[in-house]
Image: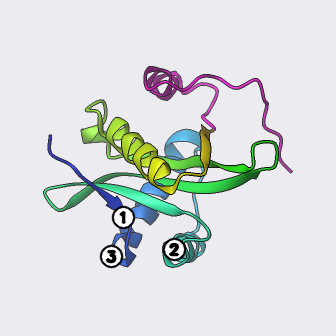
Amino acid sequence: MQLNIRVAQDKDISALVEFNQNMAFETEQKHLDSEVLSKGVGALVADSNKGFYLVAELDAQVVGSLMVTTEWSDWRNAVFWWIQSVYIVPNFRRRGIYAQLYAKVKALAEEQGNICGFRLYVEKDNTVAQSTYTALGMHESHYLMFEE
């Protein structure tokens, strides 16, 4: 499968909004507000200081995406990239699309030079995703996530 992996542009916002809505419903049965989500996705696409999305295209159709945001590590004097909002269109899952997106993330990090690692969070019950991340060299962290 010959995919084109690239940084998202304005023309991808509607697909990214749809992907985020689908992912939120599939994983948490949450309905995200389209207007708020569109503004949020658009803000990130417009401002690389917030992060970036990568999209996977097949025959000019966006079939997958992920978002990268940053976390400064004072312990390492370098940056962690957080991988978020991973979504692959259901008919294209289990075909290595995420692996190609992740390979692009790693290549971009190598080019940038000050990236010390990659982090992501995954639903506790999403064992399929967990096995994918493990197969690509990631491991479970000893940290728990808390939020308010």
* Residue located beneath label 2 in the image: 38
Q: Secondary structure at mark 3?
A: helix
Foreground: disc 3 or disc 2: 3
Can residue 59 be seen here? The reply is: yes
How many neighbours does mark 1 have within 10 angstroms: few (below 14), some (14-19), or many (20 or more)? some
Check residue 11 in the rendering and tell me which mark sits there, or answer none: 3
> Which span of residues is magenta-colored?
121-148
Q: Does residue 15 lie above or below 147 as drawn?
A: below
Residue drawn at point x = 54 percent, y = 54 percent: 68
Whether the residues at callouts 3 and 2 have beta carbons within 8 Å, the answer is: no
- Which numbered disc flags the more N-terminal residue, 3 or 2? 3
Residue 12 drawn above or below residue 27: below
Measured as percent of width and height from the top left, residue 49 is found at: 61, 71
**Which amino acid does the dot numbered 2 rest on?**
Ser
Which percent across, then down, holds residue 143? 78, 29
What's the residue type where badge 3 is placed?
Answer: Lys
Foreground: disc 1 or disc 3: 3
Q: Which mark is residue 15?
A: 1
Classify 10 Å Cα crowding around label 2: few (below 14), some (14-19), many (20 and above). Answer: some
- Residue positioned 49% across, 24% down in the render: 137
Residue 60 part of the magenta-drawn span = no
- Where residue 43 sits in the image (x, y, percent)? 56, 76
Q: Amino acid at mark 1?
A: Ala
